[in-house]
Amino acid sequence: MQMPVKNQATSAMPVSIATALGASPLEACDSNLLLQAVLGVNHAYLAAHSDQLLNFRQMGAYQELVQRRAAGEPTAYILGEREFYGLNFKVTSAVLIPRPETELLLEQALERMPPGQFCRVLELGTGSGNIALALALHRPLTRITAVDSSQAALAIAGQNATQVLGTESGDIIFTKSDWYEALDGETFDFIISNPPYVASDDAHLQLGDVRFEPRLALNGGADGLDCIRRIIREAPPHLRKGGWLLFEHGYDQAPACRNLLIQSGFGGLFCADDLAGIPRVSGGRIQ
């Protein structure tokens, strides 16, 4: 809603929170999040103060954010953050936006890591660091190496480490590496990854928020399995006996992933469905 300006010294006719939200062309969730950011309040505040009037500066700032979202820019990039597993992580266009379905990968890892037991963990393709940092918070005895081929992504992950863990972030090592390339002879109890697994000709790469996300974090080659193949094939030398490999994959890739795990000598194979009933996380254990 474009408000007329009486003059440069005074604001236009004030508009209430309810009116501003009602005039937005966006989904209610996005409209609420953007107005919360402008006002520095939470959702409960908006609901309890729906009659509060917005001044011209607040309305202008809100309209600008609405226009950016209406043009397709992801809300997470506009706000500069996204919630994952109850934590807020800084995100920019240098990293993949954390998604709720990826929480399943974290949960599967936590199930296999007894609290109070030390273990070494490798996360491949850490991006914003959301998986590694949530894991470190819930299993503080783990020592985690998190790698990414993007220096810009590692910079974001480092900032998130300070924000989430503070002075305890020393137990996570962020390293620039093309998958296992920089991990000379290192071995781990767990290898975890949410790799690129979208086929390069998939139409979804041209739709919605995905258009704005880094292709490096999405494109998995002709059939979407290029990165998964390499992760599975090169995992055994980096896993200790009995160590686990767990990774996220596409909705139709579970059978192919199972075959790849078998070919590389993994046992104890599993596949877990997300909340929508879609096979989302697979893995196995080195014998």
Image (tube, rainbow, N blue to C red):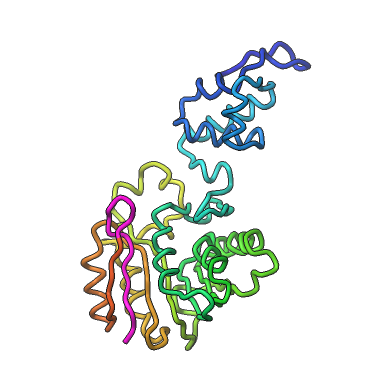
Does 277 appear above or below 72? below
Q: Toward which corner of the image does residue 8 lie, by quadrant?
A: top right
As rendered, which of 20 and 18 lies closer to the eye? 18
Give the residue displayed 66% in from the left and 33% down from the top. 39
The picture places residue 239, in percent across and down from the top left corner, at: 41, 84
26 left or right of 274? right
Picture layout, residue 10 above or below residue 256: above
Looking at the picture, how far across and down is residue 1, in whole percent?
55, 19
- Image quadrant where one finds the C terminus: bottom left
Which residue is depicted at the point 57% across and 52% down? 88
Q: Position of residue 179 (x, y in %)?
A: 44, 74
Residue at x 43% of width, y 75% of height:
191
State which region is magenta.
273-287
Main secondary structure of the magenta stretch: strand
Magenta highlight on residue 285? yes
Pick the front one: 141 or 132? 141
Total marks shown come to 0
Q: Residue furthest right?
A: 9
Could you tell me which residue is drawn at 53 percent across and 55 percent down? 94
> In which quadrant of the rendered view does residue 215 lie?
bottom left
Q: Is 213 part of what is drawn in magenta?
A: no
Instruction: Check the image and report above or below for 49 versus 169.
Output: above
Q: Position of residue 31 (x, y in %)?
A: 52, 31
Relative to 204, residue 194 above or below: below
